[in-house]
C-alpha cells in the first residue's frame, strides 16, 4: 500500500485524520499509524477508506505494486498497446485475488480513458472481493476460464467459460471460485473519475 498516496488523497479532499476517523469508524491514532506505514490495514479497512475518499481501492497501492511502463501510445493517439508483461497489477491482501488493468490507468486520470478493464484471477476457494460490493456504474464480466459462482443481488448464478453477465449500477455482487483450477474473468466498466 502507498501510505504517502493515502495521505495525499486525504489532504486533497480536505479531510483531517479526525474527519476520516469519524467516517471510517477507525481511530485517528490507527489511521495515523497506517499513513506512517507502521500498521497494515485489513482489506475491509482499505475498502472503508477508499469509499470515504471516493477513490477505487487500487488507487491506494503504489506505482510499483501497479507498475506498467509498457503502455505504448501511438503518435496520433488513435490507440494504446498494453503488453501482457507490462500490465499494471496488484494483489489484494487477505483474499489473494490478482487484478491486472487491461486498459490504460492512472490514478489521477491523466491517461484520459473513459473505460476501465480488469483481468481478474481467483484461486480456488476465493472471492473477487472480501464482501459483496455495489459499484456506481454499469459493467460487464466475461468468464475466460473456469466456473464462477456469481452472487448478484438476491440471485446466485453459475457462469461457465464463455458466459458473460451485465451488472447494473448499484447492484450488490461478488464472484466465487468453487472449482479446482484458477478462475479468470475479464471485466469492463465506465470509468468514474473523482477529483479532489
Image (cartoon, grey):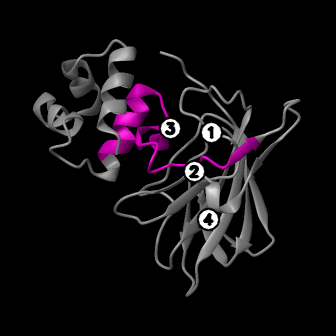
Tell me the mark number nearer the camera, choosing from 1 and 3. 1
Residue holding disc 4: 150
Disc 3 versus disc 2: nearer the observer: 2
Calculate the distance from the C-alpha at mark 4 to the C-alpha at mark 1. 26 Å
Give the Cα separation between the discs numbered 1 and 2.
8 Å
With respect to residue 70, does 111 lie above or below? above
Q: Looking at the rendering, which quadrant does residue 33 occupy? A: top left
Q: What segment is highlighted magenta in the picture?
A: 45-72
Q: Is residue 65 magenta?
A: yes
Residue 31 percent across, percent down from the top left: 19, 34
> Which residue occupies 85% across, 32% down?
75
Q: Is residue 155 visible from the viewing direction of this image? A: no
**Relative to residue 89, is residue 54 depicted above or below?**
above
Q: Which mark is residue 88?
A: 2
Please name the residue that numbered disc 1 is placed on: 105
Mark nearer the N terminus (3 vs 4):
3
Q: Earlier in the sequence, mark 4 or mark 1?
A: 1
Amino acid at each position: 500500500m502507498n501510505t504517502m498516496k493515502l495521505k495525499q488523497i486525504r489532504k486533497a479532499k480536505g479531510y483531517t485524520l479526525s474527519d476520516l476517523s469519524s467516517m471510517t469508524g477507525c481511530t485517528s491514532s490507527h489511521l495515523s499509524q497506517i499513513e506512517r506505514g507502521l500498521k497494515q490495514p485489513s482489506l475491509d479497512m482499505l475498502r472503508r477508506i477508499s469509499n470515504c475518499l471516493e477513490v477505487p481501492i487500487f488507487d491506494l497501492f503504489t506505482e510499483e505494486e501497479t507498475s506498467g511502463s509498457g503502455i505504448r501510445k501511438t503518435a496520433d493517439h488513435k490507440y494504446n498497446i498494453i503488453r501482457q508483461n507490462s500490465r499494471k497489477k496488484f494483489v489484494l491482501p487477505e483474499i489473494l485475488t490478482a487484478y491486472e488493468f487491461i486498459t490504460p490507468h492512472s490514478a489521477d486520470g491523466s491517461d484520459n480513458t473513459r473505460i476501465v478493464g480488469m483481468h481478474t484471477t481467483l484461486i480456488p476457494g476465493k472471492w473477487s472481493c472480501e464482501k459483496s460490493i455495489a459499484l456506481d456504474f454499469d459493467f460487464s464480466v466475461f468468464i475466460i476460464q473456469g466456473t464462477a459462482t456469481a452472487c448478484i443481488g438476491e440471485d446466485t448464478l453459475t457462469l461457465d467459460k464463455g458466459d458473460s453477465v451485465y451488472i447494473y449500477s448499484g447492484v450488490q455482487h461478488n464472484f466465487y471460485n468453487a472449482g479446482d483450477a484458477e478462475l479468470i474473468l475479464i471485466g469492463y466498466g465506465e470509468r468514474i473519475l473523482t477529483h479532489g
